[in-house]
Amino acid sequence: MAKDGTITYTPEKEEMFKVALGELLEHATSTSIKRTIGTYNYAKSYAWNLDKLESLTAAALEECAVFLGLTVRNDRNAKAYKNKTILSDRIIMRIEAHYEEECDECNEKYRHRYNSPEPVLRCYLCMQGCHDCEGINARFERCSQETAGQLTGSVWLCRGCRLKNDLSFETGSKTQSVSFSTVESVKKEEREKEKEEEEEKEKVE
């Protein structure tokens, strides 16, 4: 990564980013949504993108979040996100959830399009959707039956987050993936992230 936060990717990966973002812009239903998505830059760091999105109005962020499938208001019309920092973070994750990922079950690369059916599972850490393959569907069905239709106590992690968090285990000479992990193993990181966001918000205020 360069000092200005610019990240260099292979031509193939850059093309994938452009196609995914282009699809979102094509389906955007307003100029405001297009402007918000256009503020995001795949070639910049997370911190750079977070700062740029935070500079937008809360109304613009909420409109874009709804377009991306996020719930921003509860039944009492109260905000579901405490501040623009958290909302901007979720928008970044939902944008990047349209990028290509590799399936932990079948090892095939896949990508969710804007108008694709909602995946049966989303990554607990980054919101990436799972692959629609036999392995994933069989595992989801098995877990659903074991917990009476609710994945209580378990979460799904995409391959990217599993590798970042080193959530694998060894069986002899073979490394097994842990796509489904206990809530306790990942909730700590989520709580720490939210705490840091709150502290940063307090400093600004």
Image (cartoon, rainbow, N blue to C red):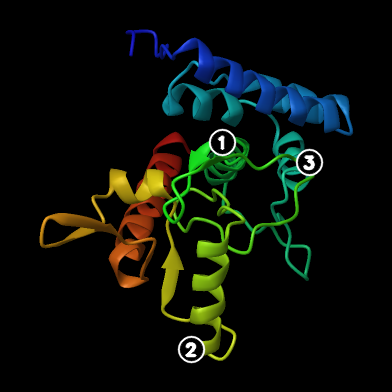
Label 2 SS: helix
As measured in the structure, the alpha-carbon distance from the residue carrying label 1 to the one carrying label 3 is 18 Å
Q: Where 10 falls versus 156 (above or below)?
A: above
Residue 59 vertical position relative to residue 137 in the rendered view, above or below: above
The dot on residue 125 is none
Per the model, the C-alpha gap separating discs 2 and 3 is 38 Å
> At which x and y percent is residue 85?
53, 40
Give the residue at x 55% y 57%: 122
Task: Pinpoint residue 143: horizontal percent, then vertical percent.
Answer: 49, 80
Q: Is residue 14 left or right of residue 113?
A: left
Q: Quadrant of the N terminus?
A: top left
Of mark 2 and mark 3, the one earlier in the sequence is 3
Disc on the earlier residue, 2 or 1: 1
> How packed is label 1: few (under 14 Cα within 10 Å), some, or many (20 or more)?
some
Number of marks: 3
In the image, is 178 to the left or to the right of 117? Answer: left
From the viewer's perspective, is the residue at label 2 or at label 1 nearer? 2
* Residue bearing mark 3: 63
Residue 96 is labelled as 1
Q: Which mark is residue 146?
A: 2
